[in-house]
Amino acid sequence: MRLILIRHGEAVGNASGVMLGRQDVPLTERGRQQALALREKLPPPNAIYTSPLQRCRDTATLINPCPELKIQELAELIEIDQGIFTGLTWAQAQAQHPELCKELEESDYLISVPEAESMAMAWQRAKQAWKQLRRHSDEDCVWCISHGGFLQCLISVVLGSDRLWGMEIPPAAWFDFSVRVDLDGRFEAENIRWWRINAFNQNL
């Protein structure tokens, strides 16, 4: 299966560093242009899945090259809930929650943010998303439009990694994988054509 994981185009608040979480905001005009440009870069899909949030749904609609292809919302693709940080920039969070932010900056480990979804919960959600995506056949090309935070979990799950790799994922960036949906990706398979990274955090 060709699996294309896509971060939505630039949304209101992205440029100023707002931690959107599940705040439902639209794309900016730049984000809409990014989505239209992205449509020309990707192989045609057999299925398109999107987070239920507006910035992803709008991206999915704009990049869909096949008007007759129904875009499917997948609840598991929603962004990680940022809890009390939702809608704040980091500077605003530091002003409102100085002790918590200091702890987050100094700790080598994940610190829980009140009312936020834990990374362990997001990781389990990514496993559920991957389980649903693997119902497709090896001949399919599947696009998934999601968010910068959650994609880090989903990418680790797709790669079979036992850890979360932090990375900056720009708006409209994409990841292109070739995967065998009927195999677990064990090393014994010995065929790198079955499991291949075609593009990783590719940007416009």
Image (cartoon, rainbow, N blue to C red):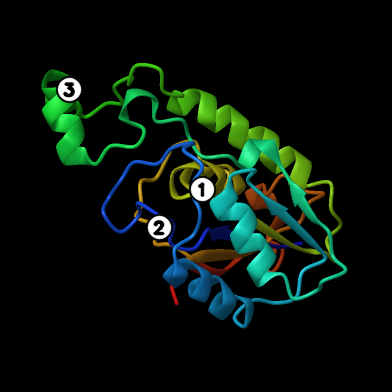
Q: For mark 3, what is the residue?
A: 97
Asked if the residue at tag 1 contacts the one at tag 2, i.e. Cβ–Cβ closer than 8 Å, the answer is yes
Say what amino acid the circle numbered 3 marks: His
Task: Return the x and y of residue 199 as percentages of the image width and height.
Answer: 53, 71
Reading the chain from its start, which is encountered first: label 3 or label 1?
Answer: 3
The circle on residue 169 is: 2
x 52%, y 58%: residue: 8
Q: State whether residue 40 is above or below residue 128.
A: below
- Describe residue 127's horizontal placement relative to residue 84 as left or right: right
Residue drawn at 31 percent across, 45 percent down? 18
Q: Secondary structure at mark 1?
A: helix
Where disc 2 sits, the SS reads loop
Task: Tell me the mark number nearer the camera, choosing from 2 and 3.
Answer: 3
- Label 2 to label 3: alpha-carbon separation: 26 Å
Residue 3 appears in the rendering: yes
Residue 111 position within the rendered picture, expressed as x and y whole percent measured from the top left: 29, 22
Disc 2 marks a residue whose amino acid type is: Ile
Task: Answer above or below: position of 54 versus 111.
Answer: below
Q: Position of residue 21 (x, y in %)?
A: 43, 37
- Image quarter of the N terminus: bottom right
Q: Residues within 10 Å of mark 3 (few under 14, many from 20)?
A: some
- The image quadrant that residue 44 belongs to is bottom right
The residue that label 1 is drawn on is 151
Q: Residues within 10 Å of mark 1 (few under 14, many from 20)?
A: many
